Image (cartoon, rainbow, N blue to C red):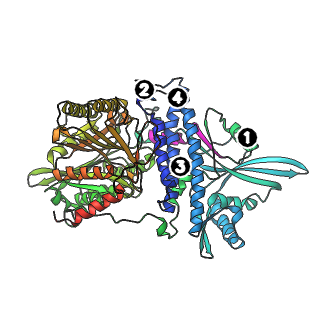
Amino acid sequence: MREKNKYINRELSWLQFNARVLQEAADETVPLIERLRFLGIFSNNLDEFFKVRYATVKRIEQAGKGGKKALGGVTASDLLKEITHIVIDQQSTSLEILDEIRGELEKHKICIIKEDEVTEKQAQFVQDYFLQKVSPALVTIILNDLEELPRLKDSAAYLAVRMILDEDGKKEKKYILIEIPRGIERFVEIPSEDGKKYIIILDDLIRYNLKSLFSIFNYESISAHMIKITRDAELDMAGDLTKSYIDKLLSSIKDRIEGEPVRFVYDKTIGKDTLDFLLSKMGIDDSDSLIPGGRYHNRRDYMKFPSLGASDLLYKKYAALPIKGLTLQGSLLGKIAEKDYLQYTPYHTFSYTVKFLREAALDPKVKAINITIYRLAEISHIASSLINAVKNGKKVTVSIELRARFDEANNIRYAEQMQREGVKLIFGVPGLKVHCKACVIERLEGRKKMLYGFVSTGNFNESTAKIYTDYTLFTANQSILKDINKVFNFFEINYKVNKYKHLIVSPHYSRTTFERLIDNEINNARLGKPSGMKIKLNSLSDYKMIDKLYEASRAGVKIKLIVRGICCLIPGVEGMSENIEAISIIDKYLEHPRLYIFENGGEPKTYISSADWMTRNLDNRVEISCPIYQKDIQQELLDTFNICWSDNVKARDFSAIEENAYKKDNQPKVRSQFATYDYYLEKLASKE
């Protein structure tokens, strides 16, 4: 079978994922302001896609390679064209959705006005706001006399101004760029009138004040249209051997700002002469992705659209729950010594993770803390707790991944702070990203050293823990924790490949171990024993693992896949994947955990993991998949998987035609994220 018929291309599958995000913005059952925020997420996702994935495909094309094998049967040049075509359609749809939402907001007396809709009463406020807050922050560049256009910032929005001057009866065009300031809120709330709330977008506030801004010019007409450029954001770490790792990374981040353009988005109503002038100055041609868009770019800012006190236009807030049997009062370590506990954020409060580290920082019996960090919150209680531990005489070792994409600068800031305070830092492993999420502490109990720790599917980040669903296992299982310590040993002694009795660890063992687990299901199916797999992932794109799942399907193994994002596997194809079903859930929270359940002849093997089945996670990163041995937690993970699988409100079926159709069945309506919260509420109420 040809590759083209076996797999869905990774980039096209990603665009289908982002289309599901756009579906949430279009969904009339989603609260209005939340719909606007989904539009922001859609736009932000697209920005990152062009910076990384589109840029990578473009590099393949520029290198003169076809790329068919790596790209699932399509050439790089054809793929670039198809991406641009799909994105133009999606952008057009997003603009229609935006117009619809704005109309609905007006029914709720929330008006987003343009510059020509500012009333006489509002004019003074808009002018004063511009003069006091906006004008001093503007960077305004007259382009006509410049031999070369200044380097436009990646993903910054600009107003391209065309001015027609009348100089002694002679018409002259001037082209000007105004950079939209990032340090000022994009949505400016104007004092209410007639019981209505008014918002003017910063771009339009600037348009309203163009006359004031260019008062020194005697112009006949003036117009302003928005443009935005996206640059290649891949980091290049080669170069000067005398530079420190942090210096190299900082230099590479700076170079990212200067990366080659990969996408140019412009207001489709811009004048042809203005557009041609800009493209010529920037050296952009048809080989780049030119996207005609709407009046506003950087719609990712809608992620921060103000609430305006309109709680009825937002998702209802649910209080994060306690873990049954585990209180934040008293000692966590004492409770964890007795049994394992599972934290499932945001249904459970993330405070348990912070409390664990704070207790370790204060406990005189705790001698050492080892932890991996991939992404931290902007204000991180995790980092504060680790610094506190050092001040109390603990030995603290942090493996921090400085190359966490688009969080590099934040991680460097914390790395430098922790290093100043005496935390021992390990900057990953040469050639590998450290993506696993784990912590082990050593506690002296009498003369015996006891280990306590946690392992997670997601980052130790207070901010994202409110919107990302993730599992964290708190455990005092000495065997598991000794294995985790071996991973920390590998960070320091990279040439030594450890053997693990319990964990599945990338890059050395994940692929072969998962293949062996699948082979076991294949053998059990052929022998008539119970077999099957329940797998939850962010992405499934590794062709070898997909082929293994196809092999299992042909052997009669029933496979249920919940994949939030990229899924290159095609389910339900006779003779290839008829025993595989696959769904994706996009809803209020971002589905982030990785969960693997293998039937294993009636004695299920269950793992939580930091690893997706992508080539990078299996072969080029340090990842941990942790076995779950405690029966009640095994059942809890199975229950939460089954709740997701029963979703028939926000689940979409994967299929060969990639239509993002909502899952339909004749069962009672189940919205899995709300049902999961109810599941944990009932758990708290039960006497068991």
Q: Residue 495's x, y, as percent?
A: 27, 30
Q: Which residue is mark 3?
A: 43
Q: Left or right: where does residue 181 sit relative to residue 256?
A: right
User: What residue range appears in magenta?
Assistant: 248-267
Q: Residue 298's x, y, as percent?
A: 57, 51
Q: Nearer the viewer, residue 285 or 669?
A: 669
Mark number, residue 3: 2
Q: Residue 461's x, y, as percent?
A: 36, 54
Res 186 visible: no
The residue mark sitting in front, 2 or 1, is 2
Label 2 to label 1: alpha-carbon separation? 43 Å
Label 4 to label 2: alpha-carbon separation? 15 Å
The residue mark sitting in front, 1 or 3, is 3
Q: Which residue is mark 4?
A: 76
Q: Left or right: where does residue 70 sit relative to residue 514?
A: right
Q: Nearer the viewer, residue 274 or 668?
A: 668
Label 2 to label 3: alpha-carbon separation? 31 Å
Specify the amino acid type for callout 2. Glu
Marks 2 and 1 in Cβ contact (< 8 Å): no
Marks 3 and 4 in Cβ contact (< 8 Å): no
Specify the amino acid type for callout 1. Phe
Dot 4 lies on which element? helix
